[in-house]
Image (tube, helix red, strand yellow):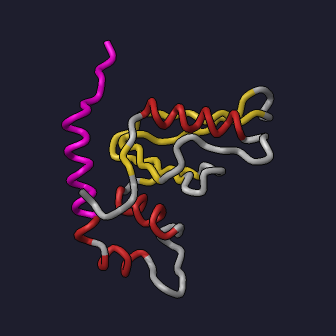
Amino acid sequence: MSKFNITLINADRAKAMLTEYKEQRNLSIPRLAHPGRYILPDYKLTRRRAAFKIVKHTFLTPHYKSYVAMDSDNGHTLWFHNFGSLTEALFWLETGLKTGDTDSHSNYKEWTAKHTDEIDTFKQDLRQHKKAHPKKKNK
């Protein structure tokens, strides 16, 4: 088990989280049912404007070797981003920084060098997760 406090989820759970967040977005103090940090493998978020470009719709679309990182650790807000690399998604969830950002304590290269063992362990967990939960084939 990896040392990161990040959970791998499936598409159904991610859709439920997005729906819950959208329903509670207008509340003064939203309370999400499952706060935490999550990664959805092999999907990406796409947004499309509809209804005369006023309403923004968010969709989860299957995309091989793409990762959606979802952070709702504070229990009130759901932040999500697409990443092309699992390491980049882990970096964002752990530090709150994107790969090009730097802060006084670390940057992406230093962070990956320092956490190579944990990253490899998380990649092993992902492989086991994919074997245990194979994708459903559409007929």
Q: Where is residue 116 in the image (x, y as percent from the top left)?
A: 26, 71
Determine whether 49 is above or below 83 in the image.
above
Position of 28 compared to 37: left or right?
A: right
Q: What's drawn in magenta, residue-wise?
A: 119-139
Residue shown at 26% from the left, 32% from the top: 133
Query: Can residue 40 be found in the magenta stretch?
Result: no
Residue shown at 49% from the left, 52% from the top: 36
Q: Where is residue 132 in the image (x, y as percent from the top left)?
A: 21, 35
Residue shown at 39% from the left, 59% from the top: 5
Query: Can residue 134 be found in the magenta stretch?
Result: yes
Residue sitting nearer the eye, 6 or 116: 6
Determine whether 107 is above or below 135 in the image.
below
- Residue 81 visible here: no
Determine whether 60 is above or below 6 in the image.
above
Q: Main secondary structure of the magenta part?
A: helix
Q: Where is residue 2 in the image (x, y as percent from the top left)?
A: 27, 60
